[in-house]
Image (spheres, rainbow, N blue to C red):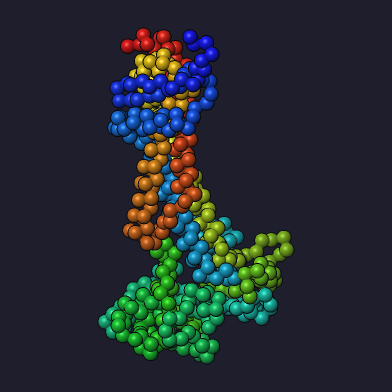
Amino acid sequence: MLQGLDVRALPPVTVYLPGRILSFRSSCDNGGVTRAEWTESLGVALATISSQKLRSFLTMLGVVVGVASVISVAAIIDGLNGHVARKVQELGTETFFITRFKAFQLEPWPEEIRLRKQLTYEDAVAIREHCPAVKKVTPMLTRGFIFGGDNEIRFGSNRVADPILRGGEPELTEVLHVYAVHSGRFLTSEENLHAAHVCILGGAIADALFGPLDPIGKEVRVNGLTFQVIGIFEPHQGLFGGPGVDQFIIIPYRTFAKIYPEIEEIVIGASAFDPRALPRAEEEVVDLLRRRRHVLTNKPSDFEVTSADFLTDLWQKLTRALVLLTLMIASIGLVVGGIGVMNIMLVSVTERTGEIGVRKAVGARRVDIRSQFLLEAVALTGSGGVIGILIGITLSLAVAALSPDLPARVSLFWTLAGFVLSLAVGLFFGIYPAVKAANLDPVACLRHE
């Protein structure tokens, strides 16, 4: 009676097991798994996970930790990258500095570096006169707690401790764009030439001293000496909460040199006509100063030339180690989570041996069994990935809200990468249990108790 009958045309066989409804095609159908079967298998996988909530959560915990750490750290680093880039832009992409020592040098200096000659005011004048690619130059002298000197400024009974006192020339605002005057004016050449006692205050200092009063024209006492306030800078906080323009008092260069002759450490700020001319301007300065300082041809320069991009380079060096550490932590979490998934799936295969036998007896193919257990593993780690993404985004937003100095910006790339990684972990560590389940002998499964 079955002659000529196409068995593949038979309707799917439906099996009712406790907590599950499973459908299969005839075992004579050697084709792949259809979309409907994948959808049904996924539904069964999610039902299996939800029936063992605590066990499933503990299994996916490693994946949750790994993905959450990747998302949150990537968000913080992405936000900080933008923060550093903005600060570099504020300094000026055409700006560079000439110093005796290298900035942020962490290693101990050898003796030949410690014995380097001081830069001089005449060096700045020579750069201004003999370097055509250099647009503006200003020497700077600085006194502050980070440079080994204490300052204070007073107005009446109000006092601000530990501001940073800097002497500069009128070109300072053109070299360093962060020194933008909000009200009043900046120094003039005559005030610098005659060592006038005038000053421009950072916004935070002005607010602390004067409150609602207009500071322009008022007299303050800086380290016991009287100065007239001629300007207030635009509000500007430093990088990562460090000192910014808000904490600075600027006075004429010659006034500073006259009051504090013992301070000889000069920093020369310079700017090119545009960022494209920066390498040429730096090269002209290096050639000029090597001749002025009588540096032999076969010897390295006894001074440093640093562009504003050094902040970006420094930050990239710091974050490279941080990213590597985060990836290591995430990898450990994902591997631990993957091992947990493999272990729980192997336990599941043992627990459901009888079910596997029934399914094979009514026509389930190896590919059906394999896809069922593989989908359960992927669904388990995928759920952990979603939870980890939500936790990572929450942590990132909390960091951005609670610490404005530590900005965080959720990265779509790392969010998608975290989810894909979680799925990949389930796929990789779910293969062995799925293959083991598919290869079980149906007769032995039916005998299993």
Point 43% across, 86% down: residue = 184
Above or below, 432 relative to 80: above
Point 57% across, 57% down: residue = 110
Q: Nearer the viewer, residue 380 or 39?
A: 39
Number of numbered discs on residues: 0
Provide residue 65's location: percent of width, then percent of height.
Answer: 38, 40
Instruction: Name which quarter of the figure residue 444 lies in.
Output: top left
Q: Is any atom of residue 293 visible in this view?
A: no
Above or below, 107 relative to 101: above
Provide residue 154's location: percent of width, then percent of height.
Answer: 32, 81
Horizontal relation, residue 344 to residue 27: left or right = left
Horizontal relation, residue 58 to residue 129: left or right = left
Provide residue 361's location: percent of width, then percent of height.
Answer: 41, 14
Above or below, 336 relative to 187: above
Point 48% across, 73% down: residue = 178
Quarter of the rendering occupied by the C terminus: top left
Point 49% across, 27% down: residue = 33
Q: Is any atom of residue 247 visible in this view?
A: yes
Q: Nearer the viewer, residue 443 or 449?
A: 443
Q: Nearer the viewer, residue 139 or 176?
A: 176
Q: Nearer the viewer, residue 121 or 172?
A: 172
Provide residue 195's location: percent of width, then percent of height.
Answer: 49, 87
Residue with the most extreme right position: 297
Residue with the most extreme left position: 157
Horizontal relation, residue 250 to residue 136: left or right = left
